[in-house]
Image (spheres, rainbow, N blue to C red):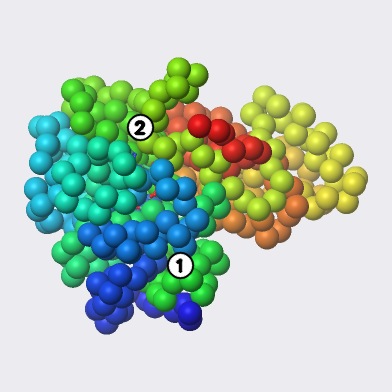
Amino acid sequence: MKTEIKKITPESIREAKKILLDGGVVGIPTETVYGLGGNAFDDGAVKKIFEVKGRPNDNPLIAHVHAEYDLSRIIDYDPPYAAALRKAFLPGPLTLVYPSTGKVSPYVSCGLNTLAVRIPAHEGAQALLKEMDIPIVAPSANLSKHVSPTSAEHVYEDFEGKIPLILDGGECVGGIESTVCDVTGEIPVILRPGLITREMIADMVGACGEYTPDLKKGEKVKSPGVLYKHYSPRCRTALFTVEETDKASSLIEQECARGTKVAVLAEKDVLQTFEKENVVFLDLGETEKEMAARLYGLLREAEKVCDFMIAIEPKKTDGVMKGVLNRLRKACVSVDIEH
Ligand code: TXA
Ligand code: MG
């Protein structure tokens, strides 16, 4: 199969629509990362997404709809605080998890009794969703476990020959995936951190919890995606805190002496404390937004330019950085976490 990248235009949107209505899968831009879209009502299309991505079949998908979509077509329970969150943050990088009503394909939620719904802010995504007027499920458009894509070229790298079309909507401005927030209970509970932070949600509706599964107790995981090794560049990786830069430096020295091609990924001022000779600098930048937007592109660059990426955790760990750190730590774990 030939994979085409096409800039978003009314014509390419019509082409994508045709493929999607025929049960096919299309690469689509959003403001967070690119998605691998399929018709949420079509069992075959949803199964195809899992297949081409190599995604484990216990990790559910997010349904994407346009801003004026009538949500009562797919959900019925909608607490007032969820409506308040939609009003405050959507369209935008926030996914809400509602009790499911069984209207979309059962393969979307992988046996969970909930459905995740997102209204992306990206203009091109909105235009496509409006043209479709049906929910489009879309996981991030990367092969399972690989780094998420923030450009059409990233999607091409992972799915050339496997999907017919990638809609090019430019570089993603957000850079890390949406915040996933459960709205089935008394208060919202964050299942995956992202650009809309716990503090922002709590400020808006009074309270916001954060979910961490207690796996030792054998608890069934609410958001299976949080468990996997993920976002990983295809090179060796090691992760250090800023307090451990000495350790990182001696490791770099050791590895360089053995002839390893090493890259260091860190925020700008920390990066400057390292010797540039022999190593590639992967500069995360300075602001929270910059670090979120650059992370995945740099992780993809790492696998191209080095054999070993040594990453230093950013100093700031709250707010948006919680999401950035969450991704960076998972990118650098060396083994899959069993569950
Ligand atoms: O920004 C994003 O959310 C991107 C763009 C393409 O929209 N999509 C994305 O999808 O990140 P994916 O499939 O890579 O991640 C979806 C996450 C996973 O961690 C999954 O476990 C969780 O959302 N999820 C999906 N449905 C869920 C549900 N019903 N209950 C709990 N978690 C759910
Ligand atoms: Mg993903």
- Give residue 5's position: percent from left, percent from top: 43, 76
Q: Is mark 2 within 8 Å of ligand 1?
A: yes
User: Pointer 1: what residue?
Assistant: 152
* Front tag of 2 and 1: 2
Task: Report if residue 3 is visible in the image.
Answer: yes
Task: Assign a secondary structure to mark 1.
Answer: helix
Task: Report if residue 314 is visible in the image.
Answer: no
Residue found 77% across the figure and 29% down from its top? 247
Q: Nearer the viewer, residue 262 or 332?
A: 332
Looking at the image, residue 244 lies above or below residue 223: above
Specify which label sits upstream in the sequence, 2 or 1. 1
Residue found 13% across the figure and 56% down from its top? 69
- Give residue 205's position: percent from left, percent from top: 18, 27
Residue found 68% across the figure and 60% down from its top? 304
| Quadrant hosting residue 137 | bottom left
| Quadrant hosting residue 224 | top left
| Quadrant hosting residue 9 | bottom left
Residue found 42% across the figure and 76% down from its top? 164
- Give residue 182's position: percent from left, percent from top: 27, 33
**Crowd tier of the residue under label 2, counting other residues whose Cα lies within 10 Å: few below 14, some 14–19, many 20 or above:** some
User: Pointer 2: what residue?
Assistant: 222
